[in-house]
Image (spheres, grey):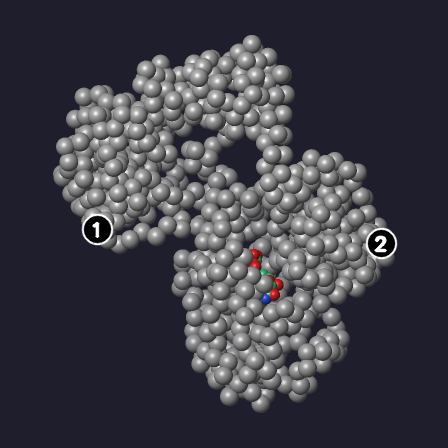
Amino acid sequence: MGQISVIVTVYNKEDYIQKCLDSLLQQSYQDFEIILINDASTDLSKEIIERYHDPRMSCYHLDTNVGVSKARNMGIDHASNEFIYFMDGDDYLAPYTLELLLSNVGEDHLIGASIFKAGKIDIPTEIGEDSYHLRRLRGGRKIKALRRRSATNFLIRKDFVEWHQLRFDEEATFYTDLSFSIPAIVNSEEIPMISGVPTYLKGECYDPIDHPTLMLHSVEEKLPDLFYIYHKMKLSYGETKSISRYLDLLLLNYYSKSITNKATKEPSVLFDHFTALKNCLALVAPGRIKRRNLVERREHRLLQKGKKEAVLKSMKFRVRLRQWRRALRKKHLLMRQLYRTVLVKMPMKERKVLLESFGGKGYSDSPRYIYEELLKSNQKYDYLWVYDKQKKDIPGNPKQVRRLSPAYYYHLATAKYWVSNARMPNFAIKRPETVYLQTWHGTPLKKLAADMKEVRMPGTTTEKYKRNFYNEAQKWDYLVSPNDYSTQIFRRAFKFGKEMLDVGYPRNDILYLPDEEKKSRQQEIKTKLGIPADKKVILYAPTWRDDEFHGKGQYKFDLKLDLKKMQERLGDQYVIALRMHYLVAEHIDTTDMSDFVYNLSDYGDIAELYLLSDVLITDYSSVFFDYANLRRPILFFTYDIEKYRDSLRGFYMDFENEAPGPLLRTSEGVLDAIENLERIEIQYESKFNAFYDKYCHLDDGYAAKKVINRVFEPEKAEV
Ligand code: C2G
């Protein structure tokens, strides 16, 4: 069966296991067996594994969950080859990994290589001798082989494992790898280690809230495990200086950061584990404690004397000290610290409403229409609009505050109401008295938040993005939904459990003005923009691509619509209103086509552009759900649909079948469709009606009123 036994343990890894197994089966070195232990998964992992029929695979599907330690030990018992290699079912390998390890192991008992976090790492297809470093770790330096405390990515001789009876401690889960790796390291003279090239990729965690990876579990869950392993390893291997130092630092660092942070918020974490903590810390070498700072040293003495309350007080002091020390380094951190410690304790202003749209980019979208309705209703509130770069022209002359300015922090802390259509900053603290009305900004076609699998945006990881999103959505008191379809999705994707306002979108109220008024608004906007009255308007409003960016929040856009050709063929009847998504930073140069293309990317509110236009071209943007309210024709320019649908985002609905207009792949196709709009409208009539009934059923022109009736002062606004 070859030279390597790869032991793969799997528990509920339906989203990852295929990538893991494919990466194994596509190794440049093929002489291995796979021993797969499915630890009683309750998801589709088993079904996915059963699709593989490779003779090198032996799969053991357990009936009851035994935990990762026992599952790996079972794998060791079944292994029949010269080498053992452990993998977790959510990780994957670069194609050359096994070959690289095997060709460098020589006569050694084991060889290791660095572990990389998957996500934005580039994996070379092939590597040569100069693409990596090979170091031999000796003496105290062998400790470096405990990378990420993981027993994965070692190629280990089976007879070495048997000789030293290396096993995973079945009493432990989170820190069990140390029970295997520490004796392996202690018993090896030298350890060759490969670095500088990605080999083993730790898969991203796609669901940090409901299915966190082991290391993302809470401090309370991990504590007993850490104490147990620390104790056991310290007693067995503590005479080896480097191991003792490693274990002491592991415990002390966890104590001074994670345990402390948690205990200051939930003192029971400290009190419930006090004795175990005290006993473990008593084993730490006195010299190690001496190197901690004064406050921590004093705290350790209090701990040993059993003074729980005094320890907690000292922990709180340390946390505050650390926060202020960090805050003094940068102005914005200082502001945040003042916000956290002083401003949020100031009296709440009961009549203050803080509004923002797209993080201050616009005076637009549902917050705008809710605000205008509030103004009309004559309710006496103090309004504050948040702006990003420039103040806006806003009726009613409200106060405007620049995002992240000192005044912003003050108003954020003291406004009774927050109204926003997108996420607020992560640091925003919702006080118990704050009322947070979240309107969101579109019926979802593309997958959202927790429903996304991988997040490809710059400056974040899947885990971080989803955790932040979850924390944000838990702050919302009310969420506006445009239709039943969105309600269902929002509940799941945002994990939102509070009050859903199923009232349609305030931003779409304007689309239900009487026909005459709509016409006059259309003329008004045309005049304002200098568009000739006799020209019809094509609105092109595409969305952004998660994976095409210059930097954080700065997305690229490659315009594929052939504007020159459109001008040639349509120029005497039409003009184009070009509207880039607010996240797109690309400046599209249309100077030589100024009488045909109107770049309205900075135009405040897109709803007015809907009114202005006679036909919409979009792609996967939620704009078409809103535009359908007008019952005007919609074309989809979907030149990259496969990539967008299958690898970038994924769709919620059967877009190709339900779309209320044709999906066109080429600029030429778009042109033809515009020249044949009437025919297309007839062709799509029944689809359009079905679409309208499903997605526009709540919009009736009164959404803003309904929202303020529920959230603000009910008796005063009338529907
Ligand atoms: N928008 C715009 N101009 C565009 C595209 C979008 O003004 N060219 C506005 C519309 O109001 C639209 C909103 O931004 O409804 C959201 O845009 P999407 O393209 O749908 O993308 P995204 O911001 O990712 O939001 O549930 C909806 C999703 O969250 C999508």
- Against 433, residue 579 (above or below) is below
Disc sitting over residue 128 in the figure: 1
Ligand 1 falls in which quarter?
bottom right
Residue 404 can be seen, yes or no:
yes
Q: How far across and down, in percent of the image, does residue 337 sit?
A: 66, 38
Disc sitting over residue 379 in the figure: 2
Q: Residue at x 48, y 72 (%)?
A: 559
Q: How far across and down, in percent of the image, does residue 689 sit?
A: 58, 69
Secondary-structure class at tag 1: loop
Image-quadrant location for residue 506:
bottom right
- Against 465, residue 641 (above or below) is below
Q: Residue at x 50, y 80 (%)?
A: 563
For the residues labelled 1 and 2, say whether their Cβ atoms are less than 8 Å apart: no
Q: Residue at x 16, y 26 (%)?
A: 159
Three-letter residue code for mark 2? Gln
- Against 302, residue 427 (above or below) is below
Depth check, mark 1 against mark 2: the one in front is 1
